[in-house]
């Protein structure tokens, strides 16, 4: 059943306008009487389309139920800017796997040029759209938040919001199995760009309470690491 | 240090010709005296370049040691043909994560047109090249085998070579944590294409000894599933 996110639930109706309305009417060719799911505030609303014209779709709520597809762990991915369109792949896959928040940041070894204020806004908008599409497609109950880009220091500070903080570092550290991950605690995962992290950065992360994580002797590309580790965190917390 | 795979070790020398020799001389601009690693038959040979011309590189072996980067689990990935170039992404990521053998196969719900004999050969060659490049880059001790395409029945029969057989199925089954994966046993992992698997196919796989695996309530794209599950298998077997 097609799935949309909406901010507004008015009594027993959900009114859709703009791009979503066009998508329902034109791309999906849905008709009056068709079933459609809306997600809002942790609930799923199973609806039937009652009225539609080119710019507006009115759906009647048939059933309201708590979303069951959200993982029990709140996982934030802090990703250093990689080259080209790898961040788009990462946002898509992280969303499918159940990541709740994605924070791009710049670090010393980033090869990609840091975004300007203007290009950064455009890029963040694009990433948010990818997160929304992936959330719809994978049946998420929320759209993961894509945060505004941070500096490395800001990102390390921001990680303190999570109970468990993982810093992927090629020069050693503990294994994922020993990081104390379970379904009860929020997790922050920090991953470097193509060049990995500088020693100073690893030290700063460790000083502020992150655990340095070692992923073994095979070198994962910077886009493979967040996907692989997110999958393992979901598995270790009972969500995959 | 640059890493190459070679079939031929002659006493205390390794002689490289063809594309690899050109890559060493032109793309990497290596010089006499530079260090280079060759992998062959489960060993790593740390070498120094002794002679080189446009078409041949002669390297002297300085040290021979068993490869340490190979996982303890032998994981075979059976992947139903997905659309477009997703199989290339899957082969690359599976290689980085430590998969030892990749078997593409056709199944009922494959949307992608099955390759002809000619296009299949070309495609398999391309996938083998991707596996080799990813093996070099990620520091593998072997190049994973990319098998010739199989039918679904052939693939299910082939899975019997592994001790633990996992069949990813969206209509339920056991969880990965309950599949008995450890570092001691070989594992076969079967993943569907965009449309997943038919009920008949799931039954046939189960009858021939595969465990149906359920990955939870979020729907993973067909290229995300093999990457995520390979990562989890590596973690559960102590290899990530």
Image (tube, coloured by chain):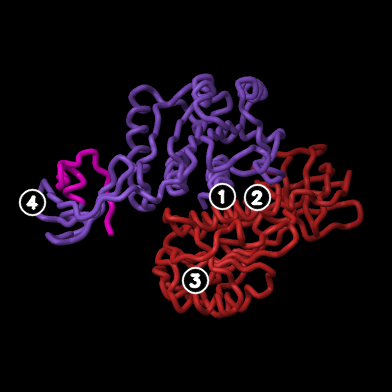
Chain colours: A purple, B red
Q: Are marks 4 and 3 on the same chain?
A: no
Contact, CB < 8 Å: mark 2 with mark 3?
A: no
User: Residue visible at 54% across and 58% down?
Assistant: B226
Neighbour class for label 1 at 10 Å: few (<14), some, many (≥20)?
A: many
Contact, CB < 8 Å: mark 1 with mark 2?
A: yes
Secondary structure, mark 4, is strand
Mark 1–mark 4 Cα distance, whole angstroms, equals 44 Å
- Residue A11 on the magenta span: yes
- In the rendering, which numbered label is found on residue A53? 4
- In the rendering, which numbered label is found on residue B235? 2
- Residue B231 on the magenta span: no
User: Residue visible at 15% across and 41% down?
Assistant: A10
Mark 1 and mark 4 lie on one chain; the one further toward the N terminus is: 4
Neighbour class for label 4 at 10 Å: few (<14), some, many (≥20)?
A: few
Q: Are marks 1 and 3 on the same chain?
A: no
Above or below, A105 against B27 in this view is above
Q: Are marks 1 and 2 on the same chain?
A: no
Mark 2–mark 3 Cα distance, whole angstroms, equals 36 Å
- Which-is-in-front pick, marks 4 and 3? 4
Please indicate whether residue B70 sits to the left or right of residue B200 in the image.
Answer: right
The residue where tag 3 is placed is: B119
The residue where tag 1 is placed is: A235
- In the rendering, which numbered label is found on residue A164? none
Determine the chain carrying the residue at label 4: A
Mark 2 and mark 3 lie on one chain; the one further toward the N terminus is: 3
**Magenta-colored span:** A1-23
Farthest-out residue, right: B11
Tell me where residue B108 sits by quadrant: bottom left
User: Residue visible at 18% across and 52% down?
Assistant: A61
Mark 1–mark 3 Cα distance, whole angstroms, equals 38 Å
Where is residue A93? Give x, y as percent: 46, 47
């Amino acid at each position: 059943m097609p799935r949309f996110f909406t901010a507004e639930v008015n009594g027993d109706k959900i009114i859709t306008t703009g791009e979503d309305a066009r998508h329902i009417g034109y791309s999906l060719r849905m008709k009056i009487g068709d079933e459609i799911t809306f997600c809002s505030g942790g609930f799923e609303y199973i609806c039937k389309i009652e009225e539609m014209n080119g710019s507006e779709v009115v759906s009647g709520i048939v059933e309201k139920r708590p979303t069951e597809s959200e993982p029990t762990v709140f996982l934030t991915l802090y990703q250093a800017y990689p080259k080209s369109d790898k961040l788009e792949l990462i946002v898509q896959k992280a969303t499918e796997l159940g990541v709740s928040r994605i924070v791009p940041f710049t670090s010393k070894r980033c090869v990609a040029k840091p975004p300007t204020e203007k290009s950064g806004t455009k890029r963040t908008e694009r990433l948010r759209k990818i997160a929304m599409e992936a959330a719809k497609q994978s049946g998420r109950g929320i759209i993961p938040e894509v945060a505004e880009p941070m500096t490395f220091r800001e990102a390390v500070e921001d990680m303190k919001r999570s109970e468990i903080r993982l810093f992927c570092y090629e020069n050693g550290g503990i294994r994922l199995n020993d990081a104390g991950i379970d379904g009860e605690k929020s997790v922050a995962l920090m991953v470097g760009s193509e060049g990995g992290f500088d020693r100073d950065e690893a030290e700063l992360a460790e000083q502020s309470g992150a655990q340095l994580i070692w992923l073994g002797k095979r070198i994962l590309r910077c886009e493979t690491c967040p996907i692989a580790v997110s999958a393992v965190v979901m598995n270790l917390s009972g969500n995959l």
